[in-house]
Every structure is written in structure tokens, then in C-alpha cells.
């Protein structure tokens, strides 16, 4: 791979992408009221190459991909694999006097499933997917055909961020990854993929079991929650949503799409800190041809684009 990577920086707008982080609405509950607080916090971000001190931050982000089932994957081994590629992939951190000491708030990387097939975490990912897709044998057979074909390597894209991170950090990370992969291919490194695989996070909105519990104490907070629940469009209940909007574009170009539920069930009311309805999470495996990554990146950039007059050169440290 070529020497020091081109430095990259995106300016995140307050309303779009210019170095502004929007804190989502949060509920402040008291005995008499359920008050929503909307707050905007100004935060500057910088993009970085994977660095050894990011180990624990990467583990936290990778944990989110697998949800309650993260214990089935050796996340330490997986984080080590990502960090073993210092010139490929990105993390996003808060700008500070020494941002290298900050924890990553977002990450994007790719690992060669065939090249690392003997690594513990990669073997566990494959075993985990096989265990979750046992009732979908046709799709499982197709997935294993991709993963077992040594002549057509599959790269697993690891794209994750904290819940309050603006999605506008994603396009520059994808653009940089494309460039870095091209450099790696030119240097004869094992990144000439035939396909990419993504383990995508999705959810359905479901009626709250708490709100339907007739035996639950009818406090003013519960009543407020119930009144909010009634305002939700019934058509949205049980509809499927992506946690990360860019995955919807990836799905458009996927040659394989298969859903599965996690082994460790999630309480559908566990996300009610952020929502007034229940959340039923699950996962979706997406496989798409490698030659579609440029198109996907372009469409993600269009979906999450910043105003042209605010766009500045990407820079990474």
C-alpha cells in the first residue's frame, strides 16, 4: 500500500454536515409530566485512521452490530483485526487538543472473510450466521457459497456509529474507503473483493406491552405515554425500518438478502427511553457485488449530502 494516506477532513454543518452533532430529543420524566427536551450541541469532528488506542472504542461499536448476541463473537479478536489494517478504514472522533486520545464515535472498515478465515472472530461470525439461518436453508446455502469460494473473496463491511452521530459522517468514510481499497489493490494486497457482506440492523415499531398492561399503575406519566402512543400512525406499526439509512441503498444492489432474529431476545419495551412505542429489533444479511460499491457510495453521498457551498476537502489524520 502507498505511504502516508491522503489527509481527510469533512466539516459537519449544524443543520447538515458542518461539524455539528445533533443530540436527539430525550424524555425528562417527572411525577406530573413527561417533558421532551430538544437540544443541539455543537461538536467538531475529525477523521482518523485506525489506531491502537482505539481498541476499546472499536469493541463498543462492534458490539452494537451483534446486539444481544455479541457474546458469541470474540470482539477483542475482531477489533484487533480491524486495527491491524492501519491504512484502511476510518474512525470519527471529537475534535480536542489531543483528539487521538478521544474514543471513536463512528467507524467503517472491511475485512477479507477468506483471507482471515482461520481467525477466531471470523470463524465465529460464520458459525453464528449458520446457527441463525438454519431454518432458511436456501438462503444459507447461497451465503455459504459466497463465503466458501476462495476465488471470489468477500469483504465484510463493518459500519457502525453511536446513536446520536449525524449520518452525514458516512459519505466521506465510504469515499475514503473506496480510495484506500484501490491503493491496496495497486499494492497487490488482498482487497480485490468480488462481493461485500453487511450485517444490517433493522427494527419494527410494535405496540407497547407496558401501555397495554391494564394492571400497570396509571400515573400521569403512563397516561401521557398512552396518549402519545395513540398519535402514532397505525400503518407504521410492524413496518420495517433501518437503523442506518445508508443500508437501504445497499439493499437495492444486494444479490442476497436474508433476515434473522437474534438468539437472545430483546424486550420490545427496552428502547422506550428514546421512543414512545416498542422496538422489535432484528438483523439482515446483505451481499452485494463489489463493483456496485462506487454506485452505492455515490447514492449515499446524494442521500446524505451537504450543501455544495459548504463542502470542503476531506482530511484524515
Image (cartoon, rainbow, N blue to C red):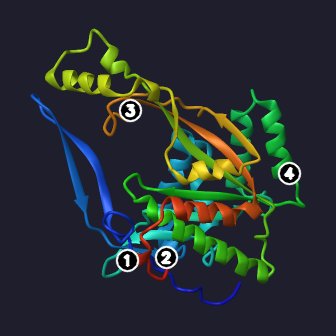
Q: Disc 4 and disc 3: Cα gap in Å? A: 37 Å
| Dot label at residue 48 | 2
Mark 1 is surrounded, within 10 Å at the Cα level, by few (under 14), some (14 to 19) or many (20 or more) other residues, namely some
Seen in the image, is 165 located left or right of residue 281? left
| Dot label at residue 270 | 3
**Relative to 273, does residue 290 appear above or below in the rendering?**
below
Does dot 1 land on a helix, a strand or a loop? helix
Q: Which residue is mark 1?
A: 99
**Where residue 99 sits: x, y (%)?**
37, 77
Q: Disc 3 and disc 2: Cα gap in Å? A: 33 Å
- Quarter occupied by residue 113: bottom right
Instruction: Answer whether labels 2 and 1 touch (C-beta < 8 Å).
Output: yes
Does dot 3 land on a helix, a strand or a loop? loop
**Relative to 168, does residue 198 appear above or below in the rendering?**
above
Q: Quadrant of the N terminus?
A: bottom right
Seen in the image, is 231 located left or right of residue 309? left
Tell which circle, 1 or 4, labels the residue nearer the N-terminal end.
Answer: 1
- Quarter occupied by residue 122: bottom right
Tell which circle, 4 or 3, labels the residue nearer the N-terminal end.
Answer: 4
Q: Which residue is mark 4?
A: 148
- Quarter occupied by residue 131: top right
Seen in the image, is 58 located left or right of residue 163? right
Q: Residue at x 38, y 36 (%)?
A: 271
Amino acid at each position: 500500500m502507498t505511504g502516508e494516506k491522503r489527509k481527510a477532513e469533512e466539516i459537519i454543518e449544524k443543520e447538515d454536515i458542518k461539524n455539528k452533532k445533533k443530540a436527539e430529543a430525550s424524555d425528562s420524566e417527572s411525577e406530573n409530566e413527561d417533558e421532551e427536551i430538544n437540544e443541539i450541541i455543537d461538536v467538531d469532528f475529525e477523521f482518523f485512521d485506525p489506531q491502537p488506542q482505539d481498541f476499546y472504542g472499536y469493541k463498543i461499536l462492534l458490539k452494537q452490530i451483534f446486539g444481544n448476541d455479541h457474546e458469541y463473537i470474540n470482539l477483542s479478536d475482531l477489533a484487533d483485526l480491524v486495527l491491524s489494517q492501519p491504512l484502511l478504514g476510518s474512525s470519527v472522533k471529537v475534535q480536542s487538543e489531543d483528539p487521538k486520545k478521544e474514543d471513536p464515535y463512528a467507524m467503517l472498515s472491511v475485512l477479507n472473510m477468506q483471507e482471515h478465515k482461520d481467525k477466531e472472530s471470523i470463524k465465529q461470525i460464520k458459525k453464528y450466521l449458520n446457527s441463525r439461518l438454519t431454518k432458511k436453508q436456501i438462503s444459507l446455502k447461497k451465503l455459504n457459497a459466497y463465503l466458501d469460494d476462495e476465488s471470489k473473496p468477500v469483504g465484510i463491511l463493518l459500519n457502525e456509529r453511536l446513536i446520536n452521530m449525524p449520518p452525514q459522517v458516512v459519505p466521506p468514510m465510504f469515499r475514503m474507503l473506496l480510495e484506500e481499497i484501490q491503493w491496496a489493490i495497486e499494492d497487490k494486497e488482498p482487497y480485490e473483493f468480488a462481493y461485500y457482506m453487511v450485517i444490517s440492523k433493522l427494527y419494527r415499531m410494535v405496540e407497547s406491552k407496558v401501555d397495554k398492561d391494564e394492571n400497570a399503575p396509571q400515573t400521569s406519566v403512563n397516561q401521557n405515554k398512552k396518549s402519545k402512543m395513540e398519535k402514532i400512525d397505525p400503518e407504521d406499526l410492524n413496518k420495517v425500518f433501518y437503523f442506518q439509512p445508508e443500508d437501504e441503498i445497499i439493499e437495492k444492489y444486494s444479490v442476497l438478502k436474508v433476515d434473522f432474529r437474534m438468539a437472545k431476545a430483546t424486550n420490545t419495551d427496552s428502547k422506550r427511553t428514546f421512543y414512545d412505542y416498542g422496538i422489535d429489533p432484528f438483523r439482515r444479511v446483505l451481499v452485494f457485488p463489489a463493483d456496485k460499491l462506487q454506485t452505492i457510495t455515490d447514492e449515499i453521498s446524494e442521500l446524505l449530502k451537504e450543501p455544495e457551498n459548504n463542502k470542503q476537502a476531506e482530511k484524515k489524520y
